[in-house]
């Protein structure tokens, strides 16, 4: 049972994720360089935060073509768990594993603060250890985190119970206060807040452990 | 000894096959591949909020330029490419625009193409 953390040129939360999973929770974790294709032996893959390929063109637009992501698409299709955090969420939407897109924050600021979230769905293994409408606090740190999708996609997300987290106080202008979504199957989760930065009590909270533990639950 | 291959001194005299279409010096089969110039304009869909455009619009007001009722910021991508004909050039550029230069979820694009 082990977890892979993808390392793109420009990723900067890869080590934080490994500290959270391996250092705080004892989950065996290895890095996956963006040119690797071999995901054998992994039960879950994390796409960490940062600025993959400098976020040139659009956030996640270049990362989408990384060799490791070709394997990741098959991995996800076979039901493997994929967690995209912040830039990882942006990559998942560019890749088409999750619907919608992430755009510039409404107030144009890079927002770096704690955000209170409501667990909007406990349908998937990511959140089924919690109770519906439980509240957790996770840090956010993004300039382009405004979730955007068509009305039709939003309806579909609601119908399929795919909205995993909502902001209690919307910081960036996301439609429907959306902070994180899953795919219909429930094995792929993308969210803008950083659970890996809330796993070690010294960093101000351990609410993120819920999601890091769920990688292997 | 006039053997073309092998560990001899005259290896550099080895005659390489000349490929049609390859723009090599003194290649009798060289054909000119048409070159095209293109510009892809990428704009946010009208339904998507453009906070940077709004900020710029309010700066226009502070500059003293009144009456700017709409200002939206996009990208312009200039390309040069070689393709056998215009249809093929257009096909390649459309693929590129749709799959890489623009994200159809939030952006529209238009293509300007001309032979150079």
Image (tube, coloured by chain):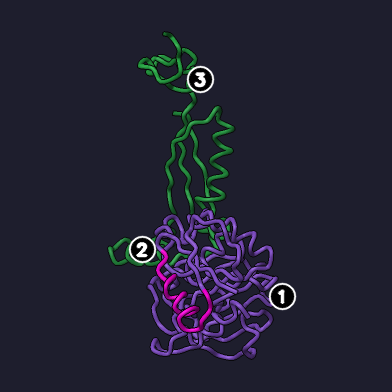
Chain colours: A purple, B green
Residue visible at 57% across and 73% down? A2
Q: CA distance from mark 3 to mark 2?
A: 54 Å
Q: Chain of mark 1?
A: A
* Up-down relation of residue A189 to residue B9 (above or below): below
Q: What residue sits right under mark 2 in the picture?
A: B56
Residue visible at 46% across and 38% down? B38
Secondary element at tag 1:
helix
Q: Where residue B93 appears, x then y in whole percent?
A: 53, 41
> Which residue is at the far top?
B1
Q: Chain of mark 3?
A: B
* Up-down relation of residue A85 to residue B73 (above or below): below
* Up-down relation of residue B7 to residue A133 (above or below): above
Q: Are marks 1 and 2 on the same chain?
A: no
Secondary element at tag 3:
loop
Instruction: From the viewer's perspective, tell me whether residue A78 is left or right of residue B105.
Output: right
In the drawing, what numbered circle is on residue B97? Answer: none
Instruction: From the viewer's perspective, tell me whether residue A198 is left or right of residue A80.
Output: left
In the drawing, what numbered circle is on residue A159? Answer: 1
Q: CA distance from mark 1 to mark 2?
A: 38 Å
> Which residue is at the far left?
B63
């Amino acid at each position: 049972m082990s977890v892979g953390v993808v390392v793109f040129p420009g990723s900067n939360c890869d080590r934080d994720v490994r500290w959270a999973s391996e250092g705080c929770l004892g989950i065996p974790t290895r890095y996956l360089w963006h040119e690797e294709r071999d995901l054998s032996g992994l039960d879950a893959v994390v796409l960490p935060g940062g600025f993959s390929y400098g976020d040139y063109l659009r956030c996640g637009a270049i990362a989408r073509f990384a060799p490791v992501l070709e394997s990741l698409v098959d991995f996800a299709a076979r039901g493997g768990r994929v967690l995209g955090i912040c830039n990882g969420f942006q990559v998942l939407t560019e890749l088409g594993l999750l619907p919608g897109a992430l755009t510039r924050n409404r107030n144009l600021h890079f927002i770096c603060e704690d955000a209170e979230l409501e667990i909007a769905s406990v349908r998937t293994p990511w959140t089924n250890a919690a109770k519906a409408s439980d509240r957790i606090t996770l840090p956010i740190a993004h300039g382009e985190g405004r979730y955007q999708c068509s009305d039709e996609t939003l309806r579909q997300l609601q119908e399929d119970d795919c909205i995993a987290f909502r902001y209690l106080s919307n910081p960036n202008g996301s439609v429907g206060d959306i902070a994180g979504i899953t795919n219909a199957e429930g094995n792929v989760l993308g969210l803008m807040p950083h659970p890996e930065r809330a796993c070690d009590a010294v960093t101000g909270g351990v609410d993120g452990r819920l999601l890091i533990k769920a990688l292997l639950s | 000894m006039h053997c073309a291959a092998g560990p001899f001194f005259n290896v550099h005299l080895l005659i390489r096959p000349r490929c049609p279409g390859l723009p090599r010096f003194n290649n009798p089969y060289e054909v000119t591949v048409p070159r095209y110039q293109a510009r892809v304009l990428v704009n946010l869909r009208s339904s998507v909020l453009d906070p940077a455009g709004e900020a710029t619009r309010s700066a226009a007001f502070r500059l003293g330029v009144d009456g700017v009722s709409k200002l939206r910021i996009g990208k312009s991508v200039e390309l040069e490419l070689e393709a056998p004909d215009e249809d093929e050039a257009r096909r390649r550029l459309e693929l590129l625009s749709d799959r890489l230069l623009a994200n159809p979820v939030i952006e529209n694009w238009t293509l300007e193409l001309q032979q150079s």
